[in-house]
C-alpha cells in the first residue's frame, strides 16, 4: 500500500515538473502567436496565474497590434480573477480609454467601477475607494444610460452611500460619547442635510436633542439662553416627525431637563437683575 502511494506521489511530481518545464520553455519562446494561443487556453481552463504572466508579457509587445485589444482585455480579467482589483480596475479603465468604440468598452468601464466597489473597505476605514466607486458608477450611467447594467450600478451606488452614512453616523456618536457636543451637532446635522432619507434619521434627530441639551448645560451664561432654545426646538422637531418613536420616552425626559434648565436660567437672570 505504501509503495502505491509513493508511486502515485512520484507520478504527480513528474507531471507537475513536466508542466512547469513546458511553461518555462513557453516563456522563453520567441513565438508570440504561440504564447497568445496558450495564454487564452490557460485562461479558458482557469489557470489565471499562467495566463496573467503570458498576457502581461504580451501586452508590452503587442499593445499596438491587432491583438492588443484582446491581450489587454484578458490581462485585466486575469488580474481580476486573481483578486488584484486595484490593477484590474486600472487596466479595465485603460481599455475603455484606448478602445472606446469596442464592443467590450461598456463592460470594461463597468468592471473598472466594480473593482473599486470590491476594494471599498469597511465603514471605519478611509473611504477613498468608496467615493471613487460611486464616481465611476455615476460616470458609467452617464455614458451608457440605456445599458442593462444601469440598474445594478444604482443598486451598488446605494449600498456605497449606506456605508458612508454609517461612517458619518458613527463619527457623530463618537463625538457625543467623548463630550465634544459642538462636533457631534455638526456631524449629525451634516448627515441629515446630505442624506435626508437616511435610515439613521430618527436616532440622529434624537441624539441631536441630547447633544444640544448638554451643550447648553456646559455653556457660558451669554450663550446658554440661545442654546436652551436650540435644544427645545430640536425636541419639538423630533416629536413632530416621530411622535411614536422608540426613543420617545428618552426624548421626553431630556425635554423635561431642558425645561428645568430654562427655568433655572430665567430665575438666575431675574435674581441678577434685582
Image: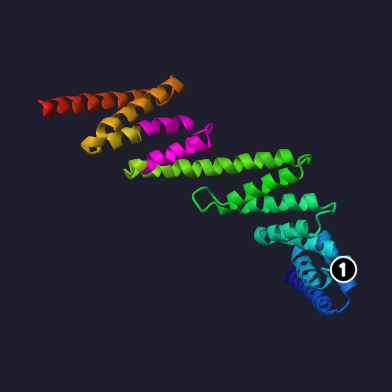
Q: Which residue is at 39% across, 44% downward?
A: 174
Q: Residue 222: which quarter of the image?
A: top left
- Height in image: 80 above or below 209? below
Which stretch did the figure color magenta?
A: 183-209
Q: Residue 228: which quarter of the image?
A: top left
Q: Is 208 contained in the magenta span?
A: yes
Depth check: give the residue in front, 112 or 28. Answer: 112
Asked whether, in this view, residue 38 is left or right of residue 180, the answer is right
Residue furthest out toward the left: 274
**Residue 237: % across, % down:** 41, 24
Asked whether, in this view, residue 241 is left or right of residue 22, the answer is left
Residue furthest out toward the front: 273
**Residue 150: % across, % down:** 73, 40
Depth check: give the residue in front, 184 or 37. Answer: 184
What secondary structure is found at the residue carrying circle 1? loop
Mark 1, residue position: 65
- Height in image: 157 above or below 80? above
**Residue 99: % across, % down:** 81, 58
Asked whether, in this view, residue 188 is left or right of residue 99, the answer is left
Q: Which residue is at 15% across, 28% downward?
A: 268
Q: Which residue is at 52% across, 41% downward?
A: 165
Residue 217 in view of the camera? no
Q: Is 160 contained in the magenta span?
A: no
Depth check: give the residue in front, 27 or 186. Answer: 186
**Residue 189: % across, % down:** 44, 37
* Main SS category, magenta section: helix
Q: Quadrant of the C terminus?
A: top left
Amino acid at each position: 500500500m505504501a509503495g502505491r502511494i509513493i508511486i502515485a506521489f512520484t507520478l504527480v511530481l513528474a507531471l507537475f515538473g513536466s508542466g512547469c518545464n513546458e511553461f518555462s520553455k513557453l516563456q522563453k519562446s520567441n513565438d508570440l502567436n504561440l504564447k497568445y494561443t496558450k495564454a487564452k487556453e490557460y485562461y479558458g481552463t482557469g489557470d489565471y496565474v499562467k495566463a496573467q504572466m503570458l498576457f502581461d508579457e504580451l501586452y508590452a509587445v503587442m499593445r499596438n497590434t491587432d491583438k492588443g485589444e484582446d491581450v489587454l482585455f484578458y490581462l485585466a480579467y486575469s488580474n481580476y480573477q486573481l483578486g488584484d482589483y486595484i490593477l484590474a480596475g486600472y487596466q479595465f479603465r485603460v481599455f475603455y480609454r484606448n478602445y472606446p468604440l469596442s464592443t467590450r468598452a461598456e463592460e470594461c468601464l463597468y468592471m473598472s467601477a466594480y473593482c473599486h466597489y470590491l476594494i471599498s473597505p469597511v465603514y471605519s476605514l478611509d473611504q477613498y475607494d468608496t467615493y471613487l466607486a460611486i464616481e465611476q458608477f455615476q460616470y458609467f450611467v452617464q455614458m451608457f444610460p440605456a445599458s442593462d447594467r444601469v440598474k445594478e450600478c444604482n443598486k451598488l451606488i446605494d449600498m456605497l452611500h449606506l456605508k458612508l452614512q454609517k461612517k458619518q453616523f458613527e463619527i457623530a456618536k463618537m463625538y457625543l460619547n467623548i463630550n465634544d457636543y459642538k462636533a457631534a451637532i455638526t456631524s449629525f446635522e451634516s448627515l441629515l442635510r446630505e442624506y435626508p432619507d437616511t435610515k439613521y434619521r430618527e436616532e440622529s434627530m434624537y441624539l441631536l436633542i441630547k447633544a444640544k441639551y448638554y451643550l447648553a448645560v456646559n455653556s457660558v451664561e451669554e450663550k446658554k439662553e440661545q442654546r436652551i432654545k436650540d435644544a427645545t426646538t430640536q425636541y419639538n422637531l423630533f416629536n413632530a416627525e416621530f411622535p411614536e418613536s422608540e426613543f420617545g420616552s428618552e426624548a421626553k425626559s431630556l425635554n423635561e431637563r431642558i425645561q428645568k434648565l430654562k427655568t433655572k436660567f430665567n430665575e438666575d437672570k431675574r435674581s441678577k437683575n434685582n
